[in-house]
Amino acid sequence: MAQIIFIEHNNDQHVVAIEQGKSLMQHAVDNGVPGIDADCGGGCACGTCHVIVDEAWAAQLAVVSSEEQQMLSMTPEQQQTSRLSCQVTVTDALDGLIVRLPEFQM
């Protein structure tokens, strides 16, 4: 079974089965992963679904849009591999994807 690994700021891990076509944010919300607020419901309008993609996986994701980059620029814990999880569509090719959650969301 393909899976994603969410790692909280305190290093608690949540392994979630992949459902192709759903966003990374939806996977987190549907599986009760704490730390993904998703206030706007996936509209790239709030930044409360910020994740930090493991460097080994960052290049395998679609390019960050200007809209997503603008929202990320307001994130206090933005890093080079930061993404809004609502903007990452999951496929089986992402089996084993590791994302870390920041200590705080916007």
Image (cartoon, rainbow, N blue to C red):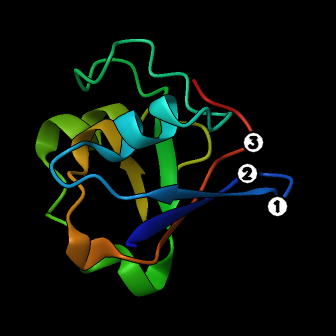
Q: Amino acid at mark 3?
A: Glu
Q: How many marks?
A: 3
Q: Answer yes or no: is residue 80 visible.
A: no
Mark 1 in CB contact with mark 2 (< 8 angstroms): yes
Is the residue 35 above or below the residue 19 in the image?
above
Rendering quarter of residue 32: top right
Q: Between label 3 and label 2, give the one nearer the viewer.
A: 2
Q: What residue is drawn where x is 35% and y is 12%?
A: 40
- Of all residues, the one furthest to the bottom in this rendering is 56
Q: Answer yes or no: is residue 47 visible.
A: yes
**Residue 8: image tag:** 2
Q: Amino acid at mark 1?
A: Asn
- The residue at which mark 1 appears reads as 11
Q: Is residue 65 left or right of residue 32?
A: left
- Of all residues, the one furthest to the top in this rendering is 40
Circle 3 SS class: loop
- The residue at which mark 3 appears reads as 103
